[in-house]
Structure formats: structure tokens, C-alpha cells
Image: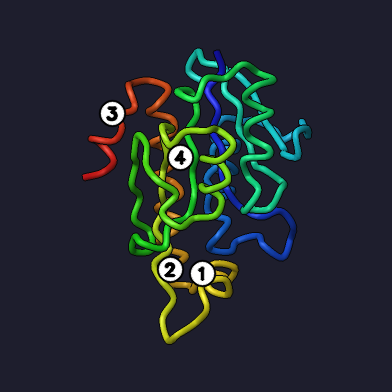
């Protein structure tokens, strides 16, 4: 059975390198590390697949826009017969300081529309996730403007480290149980 890594974000040049696309950035880092190419497009998403550490892996970036992410992931899981236990979702989190990485075995959407869509389509909150902190907007800035904005130079340094840490956690999840990966990474 394949392991599915899903990064949440928005498609298109105008959204590249924005706070809301940190999930895509981790998926791109994994593709780079594993030498995989995004050469498959179906179910309103773009995919790369291969064998890593003896496991079949699929990297997915939904092209549905954030709020409809589940419309891509559910049909992909059905097509490849992937169990919900075999997926890890990577996404931005306003409630964590910029650059903080937190792994969880399950949980609510926490107000994140991409996660709401996944929970709705997967019909469960019981799936693994890696949250990357982007902090909350300051000075009364609207959340929508903030998450679609780019990182400051200072934030970018922390986010680049977080992307590496999240990618490392994904790699470790192919070698040891997710609970152990959480113990290593959530320190």
C-alpha cells in the first residue's frame, strides 16, 4: 500500500512562496530529496510517485485551491486504495509561532479551511498531520490577506528550517512509527 503525503496550498504563480503554501513547499522539498518528478495530473491535483526506503510513496499537491482540498485527496485515495492511516497532511497553522513544526496523529480542523474540506471528504479527523507555524497577523491585518502574503526575510529563515524539519519527519515516518517521529520532532 502506498504512503500518501499531501501538502496543502493554492495553485498558481501568484500564490507561490506565500504563508498558505507552506504545505506545497514541504512536498517540493520531498520531491527534490527523493528525486521524484510531478508528472501526473488527475483528480484535480498534481502528483509525483516512486519508491523511497522500500515504500511506494505518492506526493500530492491539490490544485483545487485550499478550501476544496478534500475534492482532490478523496478520489486519489480511492483510486490507489490508500487507507486513511497511510496519509500525512502538511499545512500552515496560524496558532503556532512562525517556523514551529508540530506533528499530531489526529485532530480538528482548528479553523483551517483546507483541513475542514479534508475532514468532510475523508469523513474522519483520524489522520496524521504536520503543522507548520506561520503565526497570526499583527496590526489588525485581515487573516486572508496575511495567509496569502509572503514571508518577511526574517520569517523566511525560520520557514526554510521548518520545511527541512517537516521533510525530515516525513522521511522518518517511512522508517519508524509516526508516534516515534512525533516524540523526536515535537521536542
Horizontal and vertical percent position of residue 84: 49, 25
Tag 1 or tag 4, which sits nearer the N-term?
1
Residue drawn at point x = 76 percent, y = 39 percent = 44
Work out how far the residue at label 1 is from the one at label 3, CA to CA, in angstroms.
31 Å
Tag 2 or tag 4, which sits nearer the N-term?
2
Q: Are marks 1 and 2 in contact (CB under 8 Å)?
A: yes
Observer-side mark, 1 or 3, equals 3
Tag 2 or tag 3, which sits nearer the N-term?
2
Q: Secondary structure at mark 2?
A: helix
Q: Quadrant of the C terminus?
A: top left
Residue drawn at point x = 41 percent, y = 32 percent = 126
Tell me if mark 2 has few (under 14), some (14-19) or many (20+) residues whose alpha carbon lies within 10 angstroms of its own: some
Among the 4 quarters of the image, the one containing residue 82: top right
Horizontal and vertical percent position of residue 114: 56, 50
Nearer the observer, 16 or 68 = 68
Work out how far the residue at label 1 is from the one at label 2, CA to CA, in angstroms.
5 Å
Q: Which residue is mark 3?
A: 179
Work out how far the residue at label 3 is from the one at label 4, CA to CA, in angstroms.
16 Å
Horizontal and vertical percent position of residue 169: 38, 36
12 lies left or right of 152 = right
The circle drawn on residue 151 is 1
Tell me if mark 1 has few (under 14), some (14-19) or many (20+) residues whose alpha carbon lies within 10 angstroms of its own: some
Q: Which residue is mark 2?
A: 155
Observer-side mark, 3 or 2, equals 3
22 to 104, vertically: above or below: below
Amino acid at each position: 500500500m502506498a504512503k500518501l503525503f499531501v501538502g496543502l496550498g493554492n495553485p498558481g504563480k501568484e500564490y507561490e512562496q506565500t504563508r498558505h503554501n507552506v504545505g506545497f513547499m514541504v512536498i517540493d522539498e520531498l520531491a527534490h530529496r527523493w528525486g521524484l518528478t510531478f508528472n501526473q495530473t488527475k483528480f484535480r491535483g498534481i502528483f509525483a510517485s516512486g519508491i523511497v526506503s522500500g515504500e511506494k510513496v505518492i506526493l500530492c499537491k491539490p490544485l483545487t485551491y485550499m478550501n476544496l482540498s478534500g475534492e482532490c485527496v478523496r478520489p486519489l485515495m480511492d483510486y490507489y486504495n490508500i487507507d486513511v492511516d497511510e496519509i500525512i497532511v502538511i499545512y500552515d497553522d496560524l496558532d503556532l509561532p512562525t517556523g514551529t513544526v508540530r506533528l499530531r496523529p489526529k485532530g480538528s480542523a482548528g479553523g483551517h479551511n483546507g483541513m475542514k474540506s479534508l475532514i468532510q471528504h475523508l469523513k474522519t479527523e483520524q489522520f496524521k498531520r504536520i503543522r507548520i507555524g506561520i503565526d497570526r497577523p499583527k496590526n489588525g491585518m485581515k487573516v486572508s490577506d496575511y495567509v496569502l502574503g509572503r514571508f518577511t526575510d526574517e520569517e523566511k529563515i525560520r520557514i526554510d528550517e521548518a520545511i527541512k524539519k517537516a521533510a525530515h519527519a516525513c522521511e522518518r515516518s517511512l522508517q519508524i512509527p509516526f508516534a516515534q517521529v512525533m516524540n523526536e520532532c515535537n521536542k
